[in-house]
Amino acid sequence: MTDLSKIRNFSIIAHIDHGKSTLADRLIEFCGAIEARDMKAQLLDNMDIERERGITIKAQTVRLNYNAKDGETYQLNLMDTPGHVDFAYEVSRSLAACEGSLLVVDASQGVEAQTLANVYQALDANHEIVPVLNKVDLPAADVDRVKTQIEDVIGLDASDAVEISAKTGLNIEGVLEAIVARLPSPKGDREAPLQALIVDSWYDAYLGVIILVRVFNGELKLGQKVRFMATGATRELDRVGIFTPKKVAVDRLGPGEMGFVTAAIKDIRDTKVGDTITEERRLAEKPLAGFKPSIPVVFCGLFPADAADFEHLRDSLGKLALNDASFQYETESSAALGFGFRCGFLGLLHLEIIQERLEREFDLDLITTAPSVVYKMFMTDGTVLEMHNPADMPDVVKIDHIEEPWIKATIMLPDEYLGGVLALCTERRGIQVDLTYVGGRAMLVYELPLNEVVFDFYDRLKSISRGYASFDYHLEGYREGDLVKMSILVNAEPVDALSMIVHRSQAEYRGRQLCERLKDLIPRHLFKIPIQAAIGAKVIARETIAALRKDVLAKCYGGDISRKRKLLDKQKEGKKRMRQFGEVEIPQSAFIAALKMGDN
Ligand SMILES: Nc1nc2c(ncn2[C@@H]2O[C@H](COP(=O)(O)OP(=O)(O)OP(=O)(O)O)[C@@H](O)[C@H]2O)c(=O)[nH]1
């Protein structure tokens, strides 16, 4: 049994690419948890896509044993956290399981938007924070400037920041000593009734649902009958273990410790993340303060390109949902695309990752409809509806007003790009809250409607700032907006997959852009095809795809003009008929391409 004073639970927080995973690998290696030859680069990121994209999605934990310079052996529990803004929620739950954080800052880049966002979350969780300056091996590293930045921007004392290179392994021991000396040990009572926090859970084909836990009071033991306080379900624990990072069985987990349990659970929905596990025989009085459930904020339709793949898509979504409780889906049908699913995501990156996994791991060809946020419809009869799909827009005369979600965004960038970024934020209906300069960079705070961000905001921001701007946001709440449904009509038929909710001031611009794109994306037919964007019955933008001309004039080469006219008139009649009966074929790729708005 490890004495509480010899335990340290910590997370590593950082902006993307500042070296969090590399440092985690080094710590694991230094503590000898795994042999160097077993070491795959970036052990903690265990999904292929994560490794390829170099981003961390699922929170993971590792127990390390560290023989400190004071002669004692410490149990260090490292909780990995995802770095991307879409997964801020997963960061907060990882933080709730620890007492301290290592704040990794790239010494050549300095403080970025997500450094700030994560550090504020850690401070909210009452963490003790040790600043770590990474990449000091780089010629561009400027340790003093970044220390000043940490002090000025974040308000943390950086005088004893640990200077390291995770890549070369320089001063990794310095990090471990700082963890032991500067982070607090957990508190807890072994004799008290069991309270263990469910930090995460995922489905494993062999073991069923694996639950990642942090014990606060009491003990988790093999064979123990436990109760999940939120759902009231009871189970017997059939496995208790830790990650080293390999799974290793232990017979119990005491206060302050982290590890995993299994209990023959098939559905991860039965194990609510943030719930408290207690002992059936001796119930805890109350659950631990959990965390708010993650709510999907971006919705879109996913349709199989080949209708015959519908069942396969359903199975695949079911499998993905087993490991990702924040991902939601339900069936949907569209006149243009047939049967598919309406899916909810934490953000755009989450959407992209799911889409990519479906295509890659499940070999599916998909059509994605325009991403949409959740609108609140206040109806004239006093009811409030939540709308996830523009196709469900109620009759406008029954709507009193509509509210849309707003975010507060922090953008950090070198000031030469400020003009362009300010223009982008204004164009997206942004309201400037703050503009300050810190250590040679501008820090912009804006309120923005999420609707304007889900399309291509990141892409635009990146291209305007040549990749130097960093961005982070959180939801602020709902505000009333002058929002309308814009429909797209191709040959007078509404294409529901392309309809979207837009702000009235943006409708014409978006409509025109979409029509122009579709004009290039839909192949010519034998008849003329009008493409229109409309709000209700009012057309706000229009393009026409010219008809393919049969080469009728070739016949009268050199002939007189009246004969030509006659032939052309005849052809026009033929076209009319075709327009009446004909069907326009829209290539699948057009849907996706048309929706990639903005970057012309
Ligand atoms: N030169 C140098 N490069 C480093 C150092 N540490 C990490 N890197 C490199 O920086 C890049 C990003 O490192 P990661 O460890 O993947 O960063 P991360 O913060 O885990 O990124 P996410 O998982 O996406 O949040 C990789 O190419 C690393 O090889 C360092 O000390 N020096």
Image: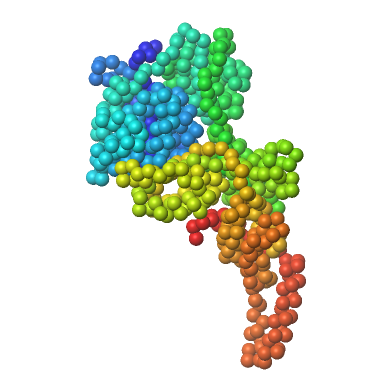
Residue 206 in sight here:
no
Q: In terms of depth relative to the viewer, which is nearer, 282 or 471?
A: 471
Residue 295, how many percent across, how many down?
A: 57, 35
> For residue 436, what is the image quadrant?
top left
Residue at 40% of width from left, 41% of height from top?
Answer: 113
Query: To which quarter of the image does residue 25 belong?
Result: top left
What percent of the width, then of the height, locates residue 413?
37, 47
Q: How many marks?
A: 0
In this rendering, the answer to whether 251 lies above or below 142 is above
Check the image and report above or below for 158 versus 249.
Answer: below
Q: Residue at x 63, y 68 (%)?
A: 545
Position of residue 8 measured from the top left corner of the image (x, y, whole percent): 36, 20
Residue 9 rendering spot, x and y as whole percentages: 39, 22
Q: Is residue 104 above or below residue 358?
A: above
Closer to the camera, 304 or 192? 192
Mark yes or no: residue 273 visible: yes
**Residue at the spot x=73%, y=68% of the render?**
579
Colour mapping: rainbow
Quarter of the image where the N terminus is located: top left
- The single residue placed furthest to the top in the displayed view is 191
Residue at 47 percent across and 53 percent down: it is 424
Question: Front-most of 317 and 152?
Answer: 152
